[in-house]
Amino acid sequence: MAGVAVSSQVERQSLARAMVTGFKRLPGDAALPRLEPARPWLAAVSVAAFLGVAGGVLSALAALPPRGVPDMPRHAAYTKECGDCHPAYHPSLLPAASWRTMMAGLADHFGEDARLRADTAADIGVFLQTYAAESWDTKAAHRFRRVAPAEPLRITAAPFWKHTHAGIAPAVFKTRAVRSPGNCNACHRDADAGGFHGPMVSILSRSLPLLLLLASVPASAESPRERIVADLAAQARAADPGFAGFSAARGAALYKARPGGGKPDTPSCDTCHGATPQTPGQTRAGKPIEPMAVSRVAHRYTDPEKVKKWFGRNCESVLGRECTPREKGDFLAYMLSQ
């Protein structure tokens, strides 16, 4: 403003008025400059050249790997062995110390015997520790480096997880769309990449009111256990049109069978689960297991995800392969009869 005032005094005219009107008095000896004709083609070529160079530079920069985000390869063994029971969580969700402790204690993996071959476990452990939270410069990785002192191996116990999910009703995690607090992919579209950016949250931003409504609707007359058996029957029927129903007798034979295709220390179901389904068993690590019979443990076989995980792990352990739908149904028929 001081400059405008000084220039107005020097030139003997109001520069403020010139700024408003667009007109300014020329000095007495000055002539109007000659106007040059417009050259639109030259302008178009110049703009096109600038856009081409700028686009090329931006494209090259976009192709560069982001800083602080390692180029993590897909690990087939981790995806198969761990992803068979639960999502193959991104390694950046726990610090290296937690992964190291977890892989050293697979005999009691959150209450389950998840032991692997020594070389497979060692390979997965190296992968998880190499790409643990300390290796990533993302917000999620930074926050997940801090674990819950009481549960340092549980991702959903981490202070950051609890803080960011504090406003979500527990009923939402029980809906079919989400199913459990650990099912990150249900809401986070970038969970597999370890991003966990706010704009990539899908289900809750669009459907939270609907999920809460569904969670409040009473369950149908069909029990969860009946739905599990009905689903297995549909799968068995699809695999064999001659399927005539499940058999508790076949299930009993399967429980006692020693097929020899699985792990040497788990030759049969009753190796860990007791001579009969009514008796308690114990894992190979010595941890007690509740009886398998529904008459002894009423909550058995009511959670579809747990049933799927249990069959996935134990069929591979005893049979060396996945159980067929009929075998699963026969086994459940035997347990329901006990």
Image (cartoon, rainbow, N blue to C red):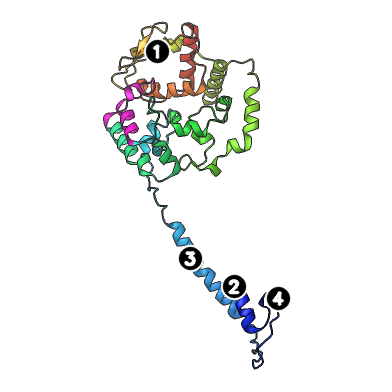
Q: Is residue 40 visible?
A: no
Report which residue position mark 3 lands on.
Answer: 56
Q: Is residue 127 above or below residue 252?
A: below
Report which residue position mark 1 lands on.
Answer: 255
Q: Amino acid at mark 4?
A: Arg
Q: Quarter of the image holding residue 120?
A: top left
Q: Amino acid at mark 3?
A: Gly
Q: Amino acid at mark 1?
A: Tyr
Disc 4 vs disc 2: Cβ atoms closer than 8 Å? no
Disc 1 vs disc 4: Cβ atoms closer than 8 Å? no
Report which residue position mark 4 lands on.
Answer: 17
Image mark for residue 195: none
Write the start and end of the magenta stretch as one range.
96-118
Q: Earlier in the sequence, mark 3 or mark 4?
A: 4
Direction from residue 323 to residue 212 in the image, left or right: right
Q: Secondary structure at mark 1?
A: helix
Residue 307 sits inside the magenta stretch: no
Q: Secondary structure at mark 2?
A: helix
Q: Residue at x 42, y 5 (%)?
A: 278
Direction from residue 10 to residue 107 in the image, left or right: left
Q: Secondary structure at mark 4?
A: helix
Report which residue position mark 2 lands on.
Answer: 2
Q: Quarter of the image holding residue 227?
A: top right
Nearer mark to the viewer, of 1 and 3:
3
Q: Quarter of the image holding residue 251?
A: top left
Q: Earlier in the sequence, mark 1 or mark 3?
A: 3
Q: Is residue 196 above or below residue 266?
A: below
111, 197: nearer the viewer: 197
